[in-house]
Amino acid sequence: MKLTYKATSKEGKIIEGEIDAKDIQEAAYYIRNRGMLPIRIEPVHNDELTGFLSQFNNVRHQDIILFTRQLSSMLTSGLTLMQALGILKEQIENPKMKEVVLGIIADVQDGKTFSSAIGKYPKVFSKIYISLIRAGESSGFLDKILLRLADNLEKDQKLKGTIRSALMYPVIIVILMVVVMGVMMIFVIPQLTVLYQNLGISLPLPTQIIVGISNFTINFWPLVIGATGIAIFGYNRWVKTDSGELLHDDFVIKLPVFGPLIEKSVLTEVTRTLGLLIGAGTLVVQAVEETADIAGNKIYKNALLDISKRVEKGVSIGDGLAIYPIFPPILVQMVKIGEQTGKLDESLMKVSEYFEREVEGSVKTLTTALEPFIMVILGVSVAFLIISIITPIYNLTSNIQ
C-alpha cells in the first residue's frame, strides 16, 4: 500500500514523502533504517475515480522489456544497481511501473537482494524472471542475464504478436458476419415474414428455416443469452479443474489446423526458457521444473515435471524427452548433442529458433488457407440468406405471369 510520511532527519530537518509498504509498521521500520524519526504515517486516500482509473493503468509487457533492457545497459556501462534504478525511476512514464521501481529501490536500500525485491511483485515479474535474476546475482553476471532476458521477452512478444495478427482477420470477419446475421434475423426477416403472410405466399424450406430461426431469436433471446452465459461459466469452471484442463489442452493440440501451430508455439517457449535458465547457471532439475510452469499446456507441463523427476534420478534430459512423443525427434537429438558437448543451453536456443521459424511459416500458411475458406463460408451463408428471401417473391411473380 502507498503511505505518506512526515519524519525528522538527524540534522532536525522535516522530511515529507511517500513510501510503499505492507502496513504502517513496515513503513516506520524503513524510515528508521534511513536514519529518520517518523512523526506521522498515514495511507494515501485516493478518490473513487482515481482508484477506478488506476485499475486500467497496469504494468504492460513492454514496460518490463524496457525496464530490463535499460537496466542491463546501465549495469554494463559501470553504474551500480542503485544508481541505475534511481535513473530508471525518473525515466519511467507508467505510474504503476514507477510505483514498483520505488518499492524495489526501498527494499534494496534496506539491504535486500534485487531478486527478493522484485519477488514482492509476482504479478509484474514472472517466476522465471525472478529465478534468472537470482542466478545472475549468484554468478556475478547480472547485466548479461538481464540482456538475455530482455531478448527473450522481446522474442516472446514478437511471437505472440505474429499469431494475434494472423488471427485478427478471420476473427473480425466472423464477428461482422454474426452481427449482420443478427440484424437480419431481428429486424429484416420479421418484416418480410409479415409481408409473406399478407400476400399468402407458401414458403419454401430455406425460407421456413430462416423464419424459424428469426422467430426463435426474437421470442427466446433471454433464454439464448442465459444458456450461453451458463455454458461459458460452466466451461470456465470445468477447464480450471485438473481433469478439465488436461482434456482441454489435449483436445487443443489435436485440432486439425491450429493444433500444430499451438504445439510449435509451446515448444518455442519451452526450449527458449529452458536454454535461458541452464545458461544462467540454474540447476538442471530446477530449470526443467520451472520451465514446466510456463509451458501453458497441461500435457507438456506434466511431461516436463515427470522428466525433472527422472533427471533427478540420473536420467539425461534427452532420454527423458524421448519417452514422450509430444517432443519431436529434432528436439531430442539437439538436446542429446548439447548434453554430450556440454553446450546444452546453446543447443536449446538453436532449436528454439528453429521452432520459431516453423511458427512463423505456419502462421503464413494458416493465413493464406483461412482467407479463401472464410470467403467460401461467407459466400454460402449470404447466398442461402438471399435465396431464402427472394424465392417466395420469385414464386409469386411466376404465378402472376
Image (cartoon, rainbow, N blue to C red):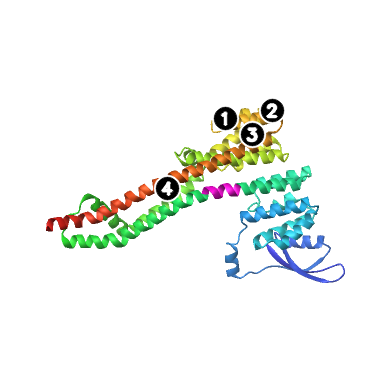
Residue 143 got which mark?
A: none
* Residue to which mark 4 is pinned: 371
**Whole-number angstrom distance, CA of label 2 to CA of label 3:** 18 Å
Quarter of the image for the C terminus: give it: bottom left
* Residue to which mark 3 is pinned: 308
Chain-order first, disc 2 or disc 4: 2
Chain-order first, disc 4 or disc 3: 3
Badge 1: residue crowd in 10 Å (few <14, some 14–19, many ≥20): few
**Whole-number angstrom distance, CA of label 2 to CA of label 4:** 46 Å
Asked if residue 42 is among those painted magenta in the image, a careful observer would answer: no
Q: Is residue 4 visible?
A: yes
Residue 246 in the image: x percent, y percent? 51, 39
Badge 4: residue crowd in 10 Å (few <14, some 14–19, many ≥20): few
**Whole-number angstrom distance, CA of label 4 to CA of label 1:** 32 Å
The main secondary structure of the magenta stretch is helix
Query: Of tags 2 and 4, which is closer to the observer?
Result: 4
Side (left or right) of 174 relative to 383: right
Badge 2: residue crowd in 10 Å (few <14, some 14–19, many ≥20): few
Side (left or right) of 207 relative to 109: left
Q: Hey, what amino acid is under mark 3?
A: Ser
In what element is the residue under mark 1? Answer: helix
Q: What residue sits 51% from the left and 51% below the top? A: 165
* Residue to which mark 1 is pinned: 329
